[in-house]
Amino acid sequence: MPLLTDKVAIVTGASSGIGRAIALKLAAEGASVVIADTVEPPIEGGESTANLIEQAGGTAIHLETDIAQWNAVDALVAATVARFGRLDVIVNNAAIYTSTNLLETSPEQWNRVIGVNLTGFFHCCKRAVMQMRTQAPVNDVRGRIINISSQHGMVACPGDLPYSVSKGGIVQMTRQIAVDHADDLIVCNAIAPGKIITGKPGVANDPDALDYSRRRTPWPRLGAPSDVAGAALFLASDMASYVTGINLMVDGGWMAG
Ligand SMILES: NC(=O)c1ccc[n+]([C@@H]2O[C@H](COP(=O)([O-])OP(=O)(O)OC[C@H]3O[C@@H](n4cnc5c(N)ncnc54)[C@H](O)[C@@H]3O)[C@@H](O)[C@H]2O)c1
């Protein structure tokens, strides 16, 4: 039995990497998926996420969205509801980083990272809750929010101040929404990936960064986007009942060490 039959999900940053794997997984379990990204072509190459889902017999649309802009997020949720009738799940995944410490970070870099990773998540959570509160509950839940945080929201990310501050904020935003909107029957959880191999540019795939991650990770391999997608499926589904406000680590034991 598919776990997400008749569910409608938005996944931000789902053209590439972890978001792409989450969108594919939710669609494979029967959800109609809206891919919300600033671009459509995957960083790692290949077919767009929406095309892959459609080719596999699923339902997906791409809506170009910059989550840093309130008007864009407002239009995203409105278009999702116009097309599919409701919003059951939003996965807030899109994020950027600068690899700059305190002294190296310009005010513009700070504002851009916080503008996407924190303000953008705020826009998406707020607009999703506005919609979810209007919906009739299904199995005692009006909607589910999944925020992608990071191990670096709990421990420092060496040499990357804005990113790690933003991720710490996402962990707290998750707890705050879970508590404030429990009475609304809105579930809000986070997932903290450890080192996951994706195609993203920047230092993420430099040999030194990969060496550091291998030394920090007890499990004998680094993560794959599908590892995070499995956790997202759990939190998106009714399998996760009475679970709210958590930050689920999918990190090969990074935070246990
Ligand atoms: N890869 C890792 O090791 C790792 C570890 C911990 C946490 N994370 C988190 O997982 C998430 C995904 O990471 P990834 O490695 O797949 O990244 P990625 O760079 O491969 O993909 C990010 C996607 O987000 C999109 N995006 C960027 N800015 C956007 C905006 N303003 N509006 C809409 N879309 C936007 C990009 O176009 C891209 O498709 C991020 O939140 C990241 O912080 C990743």
Image: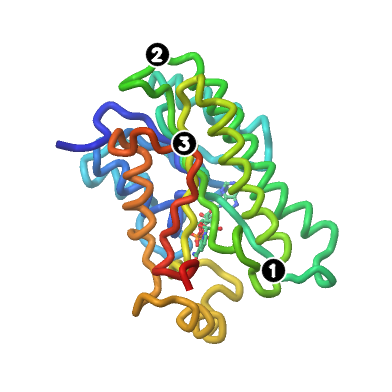
Say how the picture is coloured: rainbow
Characterize the local packing of mark 2: few (<14), some (14-19) or many (20 or more) Cα atoms within 10 angstroms: few
* The quadrant where residue 209 appears: bottom right
Image vertical order of residue 236 relative to residue 199, above or below: above
Image quadrant where one finds the N terminus: top left
Can you tell which mark lies on residue 144?
none
Q: Residue at x 27, y 26 (%)?
A: 6
190 vs 90: above or below: below
Q: Categorize mark 3 by other alpha carbons within 10 Å: few (<14), some (14-19), many (20+).
A: many
Quote the CA–CA distance across marks 3 and 1.
27 Å
Q: Label 3: which residue?
A: 90
Q: Amino acid at mark 3?
A: Ile
**At x 82% / y 57%, what residue is drawn?**
108
Instruction: In the rendered view, tell whether residue 41 sits above or below residue 63.
Output: below
Q: Nearer the viewer, mark 2 or mark 3?
A: 2
Residue type, label 1? Asp
In this orientation, which residue lies closer to the viewer: 82 or 91?
Answer: 91
Query: Which circle's residue, 2 or 3, is located before the other in the chain?
Result: 3
- The answer to the question of whether label 3 and label 1 lie on touching residues, with beta carbons closer than 8 A, is no
Q: Position of residue 51 (x, y in %)?
A: 33, 47
- Label of residue 160 in the image: 1
Q: Position of residue 8 (x, y in %)?
A: 37, 30
Q: Give the number of the disc on residue 136.
A: 2
Dot placed on the residue nearer the N-terminal end, 3 or 1: 3
Residue 185 in percent (x, y) is at 45, 22
SS for tag 1?
loop
Badge 2 amino acid: Ala
Residue 199 in sight = no
Q: Nearer the viewer, residue 56 or 4?
A: 4
- In three-dimensional space, the C-alpha distance between marks 2 and 3, rounded to whole angstroms, equals 17 Å
